[in-house]
Amino acid sequence: MDITLSCYGAAREVTGSRHLLRVNGQRFLMDCGMFEGRRAETYERNRNLPFDPATLDGVILSHGHHDHCGNLPSLLRNGYDGNIYATPATRDIANLIMMDSAHIMTKDFEWLRKKAPEKRAFEPIYESVDVIRTLQHFVTVGFRRPFPVGNGVQCEFRNAGHILGSSVPILHVTCDGEERRIAFTGDLGRPGMPIIAEPDELPPVDVLICEGTYGNRLHDPLEDAKRQLADVIRETVHKGGKVVIPAFAVGRTQELVYFLHLLKDERKIPDLDIYVDSPMAVNATGIFRVHQECYNETVHQAFLDHHKNPFGFDRLHYTSDVSESKLLNDRLDPVIIISASGMCEAGRILHHLKNTITDPRNTVLIVGYMAENTLGRAIAERRREVSIFGNKMPLRARVKILNTFSAHADYEDIVAYVSRMDQDRLRKVVLVHGELDALESLAERLRDCGIRDVEIPEQGREYVLCN
């Protein structure tokens, strides 16, 4: 039995999850996400795949975030013709993410050619027609239902508790009477988060490929989330400013809306208009309403049992039309604007930031991880100037970071998760999806807990997992 791993993304970095498993001569790709960083590097790394998609025997998708599913259409454009396995909710979310990605790439290309011809305009890596073709290759399977993916290889999905439909795929490999199990966390969620059910405990596995985005950090307690959010809103409204929140359209936006609903019902925030200004977030919220099988019991008790919509309330507005979005920038009164993308690299959030960051009355509220070399990271680091649409702008708005809302497990969560696994069976933990300092810190914590073999793979290098 021979099982090897090569990471072609999210190795000692956070974005662009692509992990190639070679199993007894078969090749399975775990995730195919978009790398996000400097524009030129982003384009080249996403456009030029470092492996031949035509040689893949299957693709297994952990969840629908852009950095995990966003480059699936490139596989089809480069010769892949097999199945893409995912949970039903992940398929629906990935549809939105990929369509939005195709739309943004096309619109950005057209805008730059028209408005800034002196700047390099990157051609779209794929278009909407490629997304439609990709969706035809999806095979959806629910949690805890084993299914075959290859010769002597079965897979099952366990709930990862990260976003709607997120899973921990587990490969069951049998050869000559022996069995090996390889688990891949994708992105691991936190216990006790709003809306989504907690991560499942895993059955015994031989190898765990585990994310480490927050491997050197702890999140603020979840019970502080509402209080901190209310404080930021009240303080900004008192100054007469706007609260602008870059947020991922899937997961983070719905969590914010959920908390704002609770705060409004409890009269802990002023009575003001709240806008979700992202067509994808509007559609994603509709998908959240459909997939109630992914909710935790708290949501059922607080809303669904009383036939209330957790994602809709008075003075909450969902905007899809471009003209409506532009009008928000003319508002002089305090408002809350939640918009994508989460790392401020594309979409309507750029226009809102352009119109708010120079005014010290306003607040930019950071509620998620910002990768290196993104506009979101520059804002989170409170740099004196940031570049938006190629123009340098002074950052005078208040920048407030709330770690409470992260949907990623922190190092205590991960250590607890791994510690609960069968330690006699677990041979190796491979740490991916994190910057190197975070992964090294997490590796030491896992070794201190008695994990025998912890690996931090390099990009493109092949590692033996089992033999």
Image (spheres, rainbow, N blue to C red):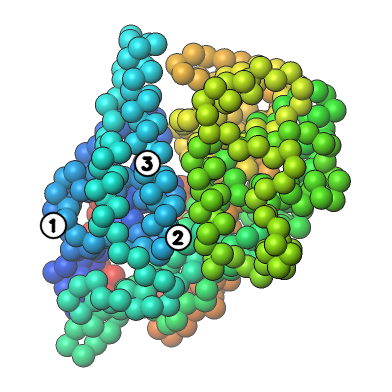
> Residue farthest to the front?
307
Q: Position of residue 350 (x, y in %)?
A: 52, 25
Comparing labels 1 and 2, the label whose residue is closer to the camera: 2
Dot 3: few (<14), some (14–19), or many (≥20) neighbours within 10 Å? some
Q: Earlier in the sequence, mark 2 or mark 3?
A: 2
Q: Of residues 16 and 113, which is closer to you in this image?
A: 113
Circle 1 residues within 10 Å: few <14, some 14–19, many ≥20? some
Left/right placement of residue 391 relative to residue 307 reads: left
Decide: is 91 above or below 340: below
Look at mark 2 in the image and give the residue it sits on.
89
Q: Which three-letter amino acid code belongs to the residue tagged 1?
A: Thr
The image quarter containing residue 275 is: top right
Answer with mark 1 or mark 2, whichever residue precedes in sequence: 1
- Image quadrant where residue 237 sits: top right
Amino acid at the residue labelled 3: Met
Distance CA(mark 3)–CA(mark 1): 25 Å
Query: Which residue bears the numbered disc 3?
Result: 99
Tell me if mark 2 has few (under 14), some (14-19) or many (20+) residues whose alpha carbon lies within 10 angstroms of its own: many
What residue is shown at x 49% (from left), y 41% (from top)?
280
- Residue 357, located in which quarter of the rendered image? top right
Q: Residue at x 66, y 17 (%)?
A: 330
Query: In the figure, is residue 18 to the left or right of 324?
Result: left
Q: CA distance from mark 2 to mark 3?
A: 16 Å
